[in-house]
Structures are given as C-alpha cells and as structure tokens.
Amino acid sequence: MGEITRFLFFSFLIIFLIAFVVLSWQKSEDEIIKTRLLEMGYPEKGYIIVNNTIRYPDGSFVVLSDPPKRYPISAYEAYARAKKYLDDTYNVKLEKHDYRVYVDPGTLTEYQEGDKYYWMFEIRFGKKNSEGDFMGYILVDREKGYCRIRGLFG
C-alpha cells in the first residue's frame, strides 16, 4: 500500500509542477500589451513628457498644442475594439467553417498618417487553435476609436 501512495503522490506532484511551469510561461493579452507599451517608451506608472506630448501608462496621450489635443483610446481599449470589430464583421460568418480572423496583441505598434494617430495590430487568419497566416493590419483611431483594415480585406 505504501508504494501506491508514494506513486500517486509523486504523480500528482509532477503533474502539478508541469501545469505550474506551463501556466507561468503563458502571458495574458494585457501583459503582452503592457510589455509592448514599455518597449515603445510609455511609463509604467504616472506620466512622462516627450516632445511636447504627455504619455500615460495605458498608451493614451495628450499633444501639448494650443489648444491641447487629447487621444484617449488606450492600447488595451484599442485591442478590445479591434477584436470586437473582427468578431462582429468576419468571425460570425467564418465560425461555421472552423476558421477565424484574430488580432495578435504582440504586434502592437503606433502608426501615424498625416495628423491622425492609430494603434496598429497584425491580423491573422486560420483554423481555430492555429497560429494563422498574416493577412494585414487593423488600425484603431486613437482619438475616436474607429477601426479600419489594411491588407487583403481592405
């Protein structure tokens, strides 16, 4: 009886350790976006002023002009809006074919076109539970939150 108990204990311990290691490797979408924001020079807390621009930890910013211009859409909100836009526009139709279009949070970048500022993410297309193939970009207006696609879809 002692060998069975020992075997069960060590089996449980090994399974627990493997699960702990796998879960610690996985990052949530918010952690990925936070890492990208820090890489792009946004502060971890508070705010910083760079080139007449006040930058906040969530990715929103204010341009110090006369009058000041506020861009309130955070990187987190942009990601949520991009996901919702793709879900409502494409994924509802693709679901019955076991395909999906999704936003990759690790590709978060800033994009400027004229005097418009955008959050930009890569779009991937593929079967559910696959990495998918690159299909273009989704741009989220940092002032109003509107989404638009660049790439194979538009």
Image (tube, rainbow, N blue to C red):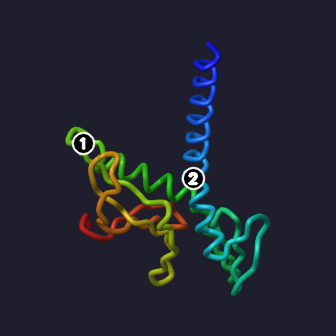
Q: Is residue 123 left or right of residue 22?
A: left
1 vs 2, front mark: 2
Q: Residue at x 61, y 49 (%)?
A: 24
| Residue reaching furthest to the left | 97
Q: Is residue 39 left or right of residue 123?
A: right
Mark 2: few/some/many CA within 10 Å (<14, 14-19, 20+): few
The reply to whether callout 1 and callout 2 are in contact (CB within 8 Å) is: no
Q: Residue at x 27, y 54 (%)?
A: 126
- x, y percentage for residue 72? 62, 63
State how far apart marks 1 and 2 are (Cα). Answer: 27 Å
Viewport quadrant of the C terminus: bottom left
| Residue reaching furthest to the right | 46
- x, y percentage for residue 25? 57, 52
> In this orientation, which residue lies closer to the viewer: 90 or 147?
90
Viewport quadrant of the N terminus: top right
Q: Residue at x 48, y 77 (%)?
A: 111
What SS does tag 2 mark? helix
Q: Which residue is mark 1?
A: 98
Q: Which residue is mark 2?
A: 25
> In this orientation, which residue lies closer to the viewer: 94 or 71?
94
Q: Residue at x 41, y 58 (%)?
A: 103
Q: What amino acid type should be assigned to the residue bearing mark 1? A: Asp
Q: What amino acid type should be assigned to the residue bearing mark 2? A: Trp
> In this orientation, which residue lies closer to the viewer: 49 or 5?
5
- x, y percentage for residue 138? 39, 65
Q: Earlier in the sequence, mark 1 or mark 2?
A: 2
| Residue reaching furthest to the top | 1
What SS does tag 1 mark? loop
